[in-house]
Amino acid sequence: MKEDGVPPPVAATARDLTFSLADLPDVREFAAAQARRRGMSEDAVGDFLVALNEVATNAVTHGSTKARLRIWDDGDALVVEVHDDGRQWQPEGAPGHTPPRENATSGMGLWVARLLSTDLDARTGANGTTVTMRFLV
């Protein structure tokens, strides 16, 4: 998201899906199909789905009951954006850069997603929270 709160232009190849917690299996199926269609290897699809599932689950359990997934091509990368209307999140430091505490049973999602993606950007504000990830294809 640009500093003025306006999302950057998205390529014409973008595909969107609105989802809730009960729709997470459909989100994974939709995203896997998009990744394969764009040439992502089967080995990479598994890591891609783990990262996406972590972020999508956070969106509908901590952000809002409905969220939006958007996927598009950007050169040699597949870009994934998950947006929810949650505005209460106030991360300490750069989201996903601090490893979870030893023996943690939660709070690992963004850290895992950052490790599995080429790039991860998380922004929160008056318009909600958006996590954008890039994956090489």
Image (cartoon, rainbow, N blue to C red):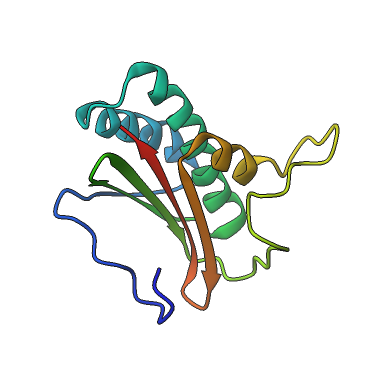
Which of the pair 130/134 is nearer the observer?
A: 134
Q: Quadrant of residue 104?
A: top right
Q: Can you give x and y, in whole percent of width and height, for residue 130 in the image?
A: 47, 61
Please, which residue is most extreme toward the top here? Answer: 42
Q: Quadrant of the N terminus?
A: bottom left
Please, which residue is most extreme toward the left here? Answer: 12
- Residue in view at x 63 percent, y 56 percent: 95
- Residue in view at x 48 percent, y 27 percent: 47
- Residue in view at x 85 percent, y 35 percent: 102
Which of the pair 48/53 is nearer the observer?
A: 48
Answer with left or right where residue 23 lies relative to residue 40.
right
Please, which residue is most extreme toward the front here? Answer: 76
- Residue in view at x 16 percent, y 48 percent: 13
Q: Can you give x and y, in whole percent of width and height, for residue 93 in the image?
A: 70, 62
Q: Can you give x and y, in whole percent of width and height, for residue 105 in the image?
A: 78, 35
- Please count the marks in the image: 0
Q: Can you give x and y, in whole percent of width and height, for residue 137 in the image?
A: 30, 32
- Up the image or down, 22 lies above or below 93; here it is above
Please, which residue is most extreme toward the right here? Answer: 102
